[in-house]
Amino acid sequence: MVVSHMRIDDRLIHGQIVTAWISDSKAGEILVADDMAAKDPTQQMLLKLAVPAKIKLTIVSVEKAAELLKTDQSDTKVLLIVRNPKTALDLFERGFYIESVNVGNISLPYIYVEPEDIANLTAIAEKNIRLDVRAVPNDKSIDGLALISK
C-alpha cells in the first residue's frame, strides 16, 4: 500500500473526492481511517455508494489503519482520508509518515477550526508534515500553518 495522497475532511467521501482527488492521486483504493465510520454500517453503505465501482473502498478504525499502513507491502496507490486533525495526528503518532497532508472542507482563504484542531494541526506541522490547504487539486496550495497562525 502506497499512500499517494492524504486528506483531512469531515465529509470523508463526496463529490470533490470522486471527481478530482481520486484521479489526481492515481489511487486504485480509498482507505478511510475513522472509528465512527468503522462502527456504523449505515455510514459505510452511504460511503460505498459514493465511490466509483473501479475503486476499492476500505473503511477501518484508526488502529486497524495504522496496522495496514505498516504491514501492507503491496504497490496499490491509496487515497487516505481521515475525518479530522486529531485522527491524522493519531496515525502519525502510531508511526505513519507522509510529507504533506491535505486539509480540506474549509472556507478559503480562511480556515475555521476549533482550538483543539489548531493544537492538532500545529502538532502535525511540528512533525515536519506540510499542511496543504486546498479544496481541489487545481487550487493554489496554501500553507495551513500560516493560516492558523493569523
Image (tube, grey):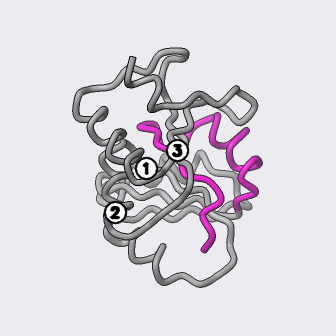
* Horizontal side, residue 72 vs residue 87: left or right: right
Residue type at mark 3 is Arg
Question: Residue 75 location, x and y as percent?
Answer: 69, 77
The vertical placement of 51 against 17, above or below, is: below
Q: Which mark is residue 82?
A: 1
Q: Which mark is residue 62?
A: 2
Q: Indicate the secondary structure of the residue bearing disc 2.
A: helix
Residue corresponding to mark 3: 130
Residue drawn at the location 50% of the way across and 37% of the way down: 103
- Residue 31 is inside the magenta segment: no
Residue drawn at the location 39% of the way across and 25% of the way down: 148
- Measure how far apart labels 3 and 2 are at the Cα level: 21 Å
Residue drawn at the location 34% of the way across and 53% of the way down: 89
* Horizontal side, residue 145 vs residue 15: left or right: left
Residue drawn at the location 38% of the way across and 70% of the way down: 95
Please report contact status of discs 2 and 1: CB closer than 8 Å, yes or no. Answer: yes
Residues drawn in magenta = 1-27
- Measure how far apart labels 2 and 1 are at the Cα level: 9 Å
Question: Residue 5 location, x and y as percent?
Answer: 62, 53
